[in-house]
Amino acid sequence: MAAAQGPRRRFKASHENIVIAITVILFVGFSLFLNGFLTTGNLLTLLRSVSVLGILGVGMAVVVISRGIDLSLIATLAVGAGVAIVLSRPDGPLPGGLPFWQGALLGLVFVVIVTALTGAIIAYADLPAVFTTLAMGSVIYGVGRVLFLPAEANYLPESATWVFALGRGQLFGIPISIICFLVVLVLVHIVLRKTALGLFIYAMGDNPVAARSAGIPARPATVVIYVFAGLVAYFAGLLTAGAVNNINTRMFNSTLIYDVLLVVVVGGIGLSGGRGGMKNVLIGTLLIGTLLNGMIILNISYNEQSLIKGLILLLAILVDTILNPRDEQTSQQGDI
Amino acid sequence: MSETPIIEIRDGRKEFHGAVANEDINFRLMPAEVHSLLGENGAGKSTMTKIMAGVHQLTAGKLLLDGEEIAFRSPADALSKGIAMVYQENSLVPTMSVAQNIYLGDEKLFNGLRKLNIAAQQFLQSLNFHVNPTLYVSELGAAQRQMVEIARAVHHKARVIIFDEPTATLTPEEKHHFFSLVRRLKKSGVAIIFISHALEEALSISDSITVLRDGRIVDSGPCAEFDRGRIVKAMIGRDLSDSAYADLASREIKQRPPGDRTLSVENISMGVAVRNASFSVFSGQVTGVFGLIGSGRTEMMKVVAGIYKRDLFHGGNVMLEGRPIRYRVPGPAVEDGIVYVTEDRKSEGFFDTMTIGQNIQVGDTVANRSMWNVIDYRSARDLADHWIKRLNIRAISSDAKVIELSGGNQQKVVIAKALTKTPKLVIFDEPTRGVDVGAIREIHEFIQQLADEGIAVVVVSSYLPEILTLSDRILVARQGQIVEEFEARDASEEKIIFAAVH
């Protein structure tokens, strides 16, 4: 029996190794053949863009491991950060504007409320996560635009110094945003591996029915998972605002959510749940970040980029299904 | 015997993930022959017949149809070649009518319902089946469903019909009908494979008998050469201690007296599956619950364990140690000390990407009822090692994945996961389904130990010897109710079956 498992284990290890190898090949290839790729300026850009993608990937990964999916992440990112900015701007709806930390706190409250609602609908009304988060994404965006954000672009107020620092600052020459990404990665890794919640997340993703019968508080845990993903997206939103000076609600209509899915699936976190961890987010982020950056330098048009990313996503899901099958023979039972 | 067999397996071997289900199978089925397959649960009868019906493919060896080698791709493929299987759990579409089910896959382009019903009516009458063709299958009882399945097989001009325990759910009268049908089918040249646990039935109807044990054919020959003794000897094997139920006939009944009333269920109802079921379970005793498929035995227990919710109105009462309980989810039930060990461990029991240790850890962590606890991995490992030793789980280490284990060891992991915190009430649903003989013994011993420790134990099983071996008290479920109760010393297979059939 151990022998039967042996090759699969080796192959699984190699799945991760393949992704790492592709990343290295891409990186070396771009460095050699692309002018302007291997420059300090570009690498800093790469790392910065990668950090937002990676942080979103962490949020998505936790949801996917629990056998869910959160397509409302970008709406949460844009609207959450937008609310924080608008409430603290002097020309915003509140006369004079709040101090930025208060605005940020209110943004946080907004995010917790809407994501808890999303989680509660999925957990208690038992709706499929795909459709619930798809719809909730629009709801969050709509609520945000109608109530708080009449303008598309929302510029950070001068008072938000720490957000600028997060987005643009450097510590010992390393962008703070990349440090943030690594800190989030490590924290979530610890939660997943060392706490009861982490164990429950894997159990729920592996076998929801068994998790429920075992007595796991699956519904409260689901709410916690979606709130967590929302908070991560909110944090990514503040980082983005700090880096580019504003948050543009048009992000909601971008293909960013597919990039996040790409990171998760290419990294090797199966959409069937229960598999993978933060290591996979890291390697997925590096590969997709390098790829996106290279395509931008190559001046590949936006539409062609979409096509390439779409194909890679399709391929990654296909490979995932082949590697982690829910096969019929193992689920067959009884009189053998 | 120069005739070619209609279907034949030569040196057949079938493995599931390295676990051998069948080996050295040499089986011949002659035209117009009734051939009984006998053997214990897990002897490999179903797998062997499913190979012939195209459900499974042989790992090694040959399958021959009319003397020519053949490989069925699917059950539909086998059916088109005239081999039909009537399953224990039937394969009808419940939301379609009887007539639609009979002609399923054989519809004409213009499929008039009226014509279909008339044709079905005539067809059913020709088989002497009293089933209304316009009824939906979901409205039928077990026996009638089986008739529809048989009718479907006959309609598809099956030359071979495989019956997997057809008589288990039938009343004596229906059985009589069934056997006369089998004789008629035989007369018209159909070959029949008959899987059964009932030896007398097999002896009375068969032309040939084949006995399987541990995936191998151990005895085979014309029916006339067999008697009950020879079959039992072949089923159990040379060494009597091979079988978990070997000492059943000569067992000494040491019946435990009932302790406190741990669980008392009054008139619970849940949809159509459970209707006014009432029963009690006492501590320090094993309460066996026997019921046929569709009797609501599993559903009753799942209501008690909080996996299903009983009806909101007229749903009845459940009392745990005199305290009324109602659960929306299983979590609080686990907290109150009610655990349910599922009959379907693959889809509701264990976590297949996790190791043995992690599976057991889930049970232990749940008992603490907090998401925010930090897991102490050293004590987790000790816990896993403790259970591996206590239940004799055979694995390299607690880091082995559960999916790599044999059925018996998987079952032990599921049991360990449920019992990390000593419960008040344990419900085992089919605790030894798909489990090898050695593990059956160990699991039975463990169940007895739990009762000796004063825990209230419920064992649900559809296998009578298991109920008789384990129980101090026996309840019989039928049509969503508990209809009969026996003391272990008064119970017999006949009495229980008599109470359980419709």
Image (cartoon, coloured by chain):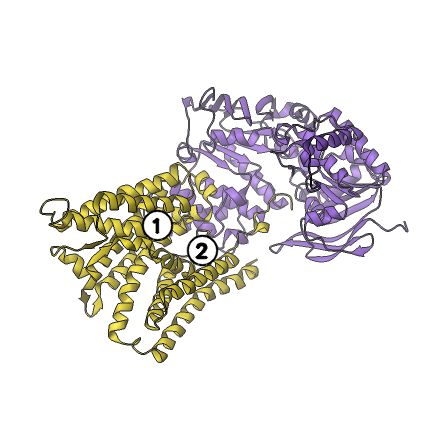
The vertical placement of A99 against B287, above or below, is below
- Residue A8 relative to residue A274: left or right: right
Mark drawn on residue B122: none
Choose mark 2 or mark 1, whichever is in front: 2
Residue highlighted by disc 1: B376
| Chain in yellow on the image | A
Residue farthest left in this picture? A96
Residue A233 visible (yes or no): yes
Q: Residues within 10 Å of mark 1 (few under 14, many from 20)?
A: few
Q: CA distance from mark 2 to mark 1?
A: 27 Å
- Name the foreground residue: B257 vs B199: B199
- Residue B442 relative to residue B63: left or right: left
Mark drawn on residue A270: 2
The vertical placement of A88 against B196, above or below, is below
Residue beneath the point at 25% across and 70% down = A44
Amino acid under disc 2? Gly
Classify mark 1: helix, strand or loop: loop
Q: Residues within 10 Å of mark 2 (few under 14, many from 20)?
A: many
Pointer 1 chain:
B
What hue represents chain B? purple
Where residue B150 sits, quadrant-wise, is top right
Amino acid under disc 1? Asp
- Dot 2 and dot 1 within a common chain: no
